[in-house]
Image (cartoon, rainbow, N blue to C red):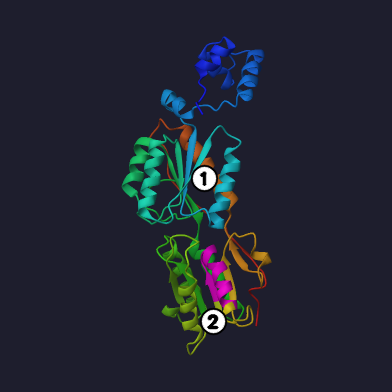
Amino acid sequence: MKRVTLKEIGKQLNLSPGTISKALNDSHEISAETKKMILDYTERINYIPNFSAKSLKTGRSNTLAIIVPFISSSFFFYFYEDISLILAQTNYKLILLQTFNDEKREKEALELCIQSNVEGIIISPVKNDSSLSLLLYIMDQICPVIIFDRINHQLETFKIGIQNNKVIYQATEEMIKNSRNNIILLLCKDIGGNISRIKGFKDALFNHSIPFVEENIIEISYASPKDDIDEELEKKISKLLDGPSPPDALLSSTDTLSLKVLHILNKLKVKIPEDMNLIGFSNTPFANSLNPSLTTISQPTRLMAEKSVELLLQMLKKRSKKNIFEFETYFLECSIEHRKSTSSL
């Protein structure tokens, strides 16, 4: 189907393409009566504006990009949804790109942003140094970049996330107060916040005089929440359960692992919370419907989205003035939602 041009619309309405363009952009130069006639006509013919052509002409695309590891994660999905709802109140459009936690895909996503003439990027990077040279180039020559969630990345910009060590410390301490002292920390391998999470875990054990056991940190590698990691996860948990001192609590640091481990523990006939307390790191809306309902650490996705957009729009307003910002990292508070997977002995 051939795209209808402004020139063709003008010919039908006996108006210039410039008048059509101004009316579609709600210019004060065009009368209300003419605007209505043009809008009625374009709606009748299902006219779709050519944003690429407009971008080439004006140098502005009014498009922002959000780059996430995977949209099938409930945290990243709700963050994207919140960003979409916020931007719906502005003139900006949003494109979504996934890296599947792969550095090559991340580089390709960033290159696509350059080719698409996006005006701003909000990204959760793959690793602490992934695509650093390209991101530096984008920040200097193309558009502002905001980093969220994985805030240990080396790029100097505004970053919005949580204090991983603090929230893991709090969750570990809650289990200790429930008389649990042999706790597993379950991590996704090669995630930027792991060093901070391990520190919070170790600090909580140390401050309660509980020896740290290296084997109690389990790292699972996956490129997508849909990857089949159940067999590896079950094998590692079974090995600890069959040992001389079986664990009595498990703290999972990603929503993907949180949901999978509950299934595996049920399969292994581990009673929750009697035999094992379980805290997940999850924003899934189904946590209350699981059996048993899952105690979770919930990240403030809405606040994170609002702060990301606020800072990005600030940078866009001052795009012509380089080095004007004193970049900061914003730490937002998490909450622990208590449910039936944790209880006192």
Residue type at the position of mark 2 = Asn
Q: 121 or 70: which is nearer to us? A: 70
Q: Position of residue 310 (x, y in %)?
A: 54, 41
The residue beneath circle 2 is: 181
Q: Tell me which secondary structure the magenta stretch mostly adopts.
A: helix
Q: Residue at x 58, y 54 (%)?
A: 300
Q: Is residue 58 left or right of residue 344?
A: left
Q: Which mark is residue 219?
A: none
Which structural element holds mark 1?
A: helix
Can you tell which quarter of the image residue 214 is in?
A: bottom left
Q: 231 or 233: which is nearer to us? A: 231
Q: Is residue 9 visible?
A: yes
Can you tell which quarter of the image residue 83 is in?
A: top right
Q: Residue at x 60, y 37 (%)?
A: 88
Q: Which mark is residue 308?
A: 1
**Residue furthest bottom in the image:** 244
Task: Classify mark 1: residues with Cα within 10 Å, few (<14), some (14-19) or many (20+).
Answer: many
Residue 58 lies in the magenta stretch: no
Task: Classify mark 2: residues with Cα within 10 Å, few (<14), some (14-19) or many (20+).
Answer: many
Asked if residue 68 is positioned above or below residue 56 in the image, the reply reads below
The answer to which of marks 1 and 2 sits earlier in the sequence is 2
Q: Is residue 332 visible?
A: no
The C terminus is located in which quarter? bottom right
Q: Residue at x 45, y 35 (%)?
A: 119
**Residue furthest left in the image:** 133
Tell me where the magenta segment starts and ends, as one range: 250-266
Residue type at the position of mark 1 = Ser
Q: Is residue 315 left or right of residue 297?
A: left
Q: Position of residue 338 (x, y in %)?
A: 66, 68
Q: CA distance from mark 1 to mark 2?
A: 38 Å
